[in-house]
Amino acid sequence: MILRGFSPDGRRISLRVLTSGKFVHNAPLGEQCYENYFYGTDGGMENAFGEMEGAFKAAIGDLSPGHLETVTVEQLHLICRFVHYQKFRTAGAADESAEFIDGLAKRIMAKDSRVSEDMLTKVKIGPEKPQRETLYHAAEAEPLLLDLAVKFLVSDKNLGFVLSDNPVAGYNQWMEHHPLFSHVGGNDGIALRGLQWFLPLSPNVCAAVFDPGAYEYGSPRRRTCGVAVRDIRLLNMLQALRARECIYFDPRFTAEEEIMQLCRDRDKHATPSVSFAESEIRELPDGTRRMVLLAEMPSARLGTQLGCVRVKKDAKLFHRGGMPFPIRSPELVKLMERWSNTLEKESKSKQTAEARENGDAVGSSDSSEPTGT
């Protein structure tokens, strides 16, 4: 559905393969960003996403500025929710999750004298289908969407937006340029002050989901906001940084030379992989030892700011648990934790019921189902 917005005829699309640098024109839409049974064989997740896509398509309509100005508040929340799940449902998101789980597990196991470095290099630790893990955590985080806003960035310029195969790009320019938080590597967390997500919908329209406590996009009375060519290039760079294998574009709006320059700039701004930092091991009075292991997911840094956005200097700051990250709303974080506990109980209950139905032995309450930890 999203790719079709970048197709001249609704059936085929132009792309550049990142590994080879090869341009492919007239590639069939149905063969892009596709994998058999990516969410499982029962079709339940696919059907749920199909319903969400239908409602999303009805909300955005023909993407004309006139229609976008009529989108209702309820539809804006639906669009926000769609962008949220689109961020977590891709192969790129699954790769990031797998890398995080593998790195975290090996970092902990390396503390065990019985485990050698050579042993850890020979194995991959993590779930067989990490996309299920990412979608579970996306469901856990839904309460954190309640205070986010949506605007449509609209262009009438000759240069068009491009799209990657990992199409929801995050960028926290508020944290990147804040004197207290500019050094923090991971700034794309859903609870953080300054969150921004961008999902291009066509060469002329890009959906922006953002923290209204940190930014203003155009007039508060309008659903749309104009963008200049410089901002289009910056947003295209975010797409290039997120790309896993391909960058898609409409050649009527974006020339091959523009894509080639975008890929060169991508190499200059390439984000690092997941990084880990650890504290000293502390001996506690009860005889146990404890350390803090901090994992930072890669975050985009452009070293500049989007011109279509006004950054609020007086954005309120909240901290939680002594961690050096500014969050938007302690109340929504607490709500998310309660919601996460509810999901965990329902998951365990469903697992127990299925085990009984299948005549299997029912395990203890310590299940392997993902939690909010």
Image: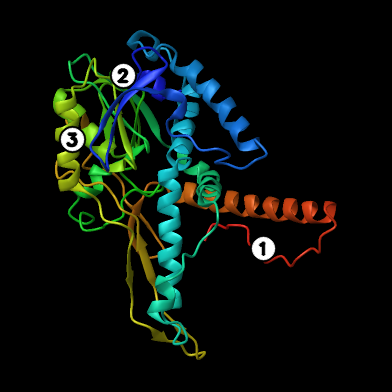
Q: Which residue occupies the foreground of this view, 348 or 20?
A: 20
Label annotation for residue 367: 1
Q: Earlier in the sequence, mark 2 or mark 1?
A: 2
Expressed as whole percent of the image width and height from the top left, the position of residue 127 reads 54, 58
Residue that appears at 21% across and 57% down: 180
SS assignment at label 1: loop
Identify the image quadrant of residue 249: top left
Identify the image quadrant of residue 32: top left
Per the model, the C-alpha gap separating discs 2 and 3 is 26 Å
Identify the image quadrant of residue 120: bottom left
Q: Amino acid at mark 1?
A: Ser
Q: Is residue 146 visible?
A: no
Q: Amino acid at mark 2?
A: Thr
Residue that appears at 18% across and 20% down: 159
Expressed as whole percent of the image width and height from the top left, the position of residue 331 reads 48, 48
Per the model, the C-alpha gap separating discs 1 and 3 is 46 Å
Expressed as whole percent of the image width and height from the top left, the position of residue 246 reads 32, 36
Q: Earlier in the sequence, mark 2 or mark 3?
A: 2
Q: Which residue occupies the foreground of this view, 48 or 24?
A: 24
From the viewer's perspective, tell me whether residue 54 is left or right of residue 123.
right
Per the model, the C-alpha gap separating discs 2 and 1 is 46 Å
Q: Earlier in the sequence, mark 1 or mark 3?
A: 3
Label annotation for residue 262: 3
Label 1: few (<14), some or many (≥20) within 10 Å?
few
Expressed as whole percent of the image width and height from the top left, the position of residue 197 reads 34, 37
Q: Amino acid at mark 3?
A: Leu
- Residue identified by numbered label 2: 224
